[in-house]
């Protein structure tokens, strides 16, 4: 029989294991629905890393079989970066249902939803996460209309239509929000799990669906941001 390793060797191996850097646990997943966003994917990933640091997060791109090769672009990046994941949907489309599938595909305790077109300001993600971690809210909404926020370079017609839609959407929500039509938000996993079987998954305003489907009133806070112009796609 081979000789047993010496106690000194065992102690040394244990010490080495303790001293080795531990992989950072998954805390946040950013779900990004995509359709023809291939040119924006590398830039968004770089911006997320600048905002969130190197670890503790992942980004799940949910692509509705884009003809511009968005899914292939995401997979190419995923082969080099374990934080990147791709969910490619064949034969079905829809922003709300894509967001739901992406949120269900992650194990993270906190989940954000944002667009791939670089219009949402990723630099406010840490502030949104901090509000949830502190127990201040169940849901944090990135708002264009809260104090300090802005719709950016929108023309008067688009701004007017957005305000009308915002007023109408308040009729179906149970929370006082300045921007209930926002597509940029972060929530606790428990909020999704409590609501997911009630969601309609229809349309393109998943936040409204979540607010209307929650079995109880949610604690909601808003974080202002400035809406940017589309980059590509």
Image (tube, rainbow, N blue to C red):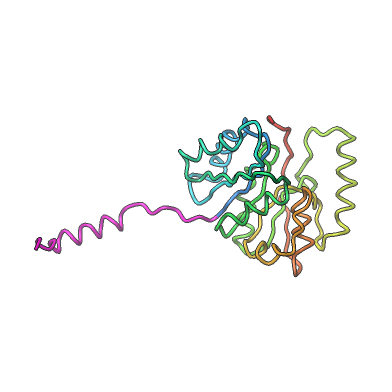
- Between 58 and 93, the residue placed more toward the observer is 93
Residue furthest to the bottom in view is: 216
Percent position (x, y) of residue 61? 60, 44
13 left or right, relative to 94? left
Please name the residue shown 70% across and 48% down the image: 184
11 part of magenta stretch: yes
Out of 139 and 214, give the one closest to the viewer. Answer: 214
Q: Image point 62% across, 48% down: which residue? A: 31
Q: Is residue 199 left or right of residue 63?
A: right
Residue found farthest to the front: 91
Vertical order, 138 against 229 (above or below): below
Q: Is residue 88 above or below residue 104?
A: above
Q: Position of residue 60 (x, y in %)?
A: 58, 47
Dividing the picture into quadrants, the one containing residue 135 is: bottom right
Location of the C terminus by quadrant is top right
Quadrant, the N terminus: bottom left
Residue 178 against residue 69 in the figure, above or below: below
Q: Residue at x 78, y 41 (%)?
A: 150
* Residue 175 covered by magenta stretch: no
Q: Is residue 113 above or below residue 3?
A: above
Q: Position of residue 3 (x, y in %)?
A: 9, 62
Q: How many marks?
A: 0
Q: Position of residue 187 (x, y in %)?
A: 66, 58
Relative placement, left or right, of 47 versus 171 is left
Q: Residue 154 lies in what quarter of the image?
A: top right
Give the side of residue 195 with respect to residue 87, left or right: right
Residues drawn in magenta: 1-27
């Amino acid at each position: 029989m081979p000789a047993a390793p010496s106690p000194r060797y065992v102690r040394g191996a244990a010490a080495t294991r303790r001293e080795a850097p531990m992989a950072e646990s998954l805390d946040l997943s950013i779900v990004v629905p995509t359709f023809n966003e291939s040119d924006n994917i590398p830039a968004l990933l770089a911006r997320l890393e600048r905002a969130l640091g190197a670890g503790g997060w992942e980004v799940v791109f949910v692509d509705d079989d884009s003809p511009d090769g968005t899914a292939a672009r995401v997979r190419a990046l995923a082969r080099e970066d374990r934080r990147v994941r791709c969910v490619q949907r064949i034969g079905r489309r829809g922003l709300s249902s894509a967001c739901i599938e992406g949120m269900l595909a992650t194990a993270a305790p906190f989940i954000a939803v944002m667009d791939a077109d670089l219009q949402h300001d990723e630099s406010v993600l840490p502030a949104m996460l901090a509000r949830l971690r502190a127990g201040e809210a169940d849901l944090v909404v990135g708002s264009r209309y809260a104090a300090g926020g802005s719709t950016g370079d929108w023309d008067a017609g688009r701004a007017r239509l957005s305000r009308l839609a915002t007023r109408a959407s308040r009729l179906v929500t149970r929370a006082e929000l300045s921007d209930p039509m926002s597509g940029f938000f972060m929530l606790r996993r428990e909020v999704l799990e409590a609501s997911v079987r009630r969601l309609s998954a229809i349309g393109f305003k998943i936040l409204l669906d979540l607010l209307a489907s929650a079995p109880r009133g949610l604690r909601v806070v808003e974080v202002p941001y400035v809406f940017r112009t589309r980059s590509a796609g």
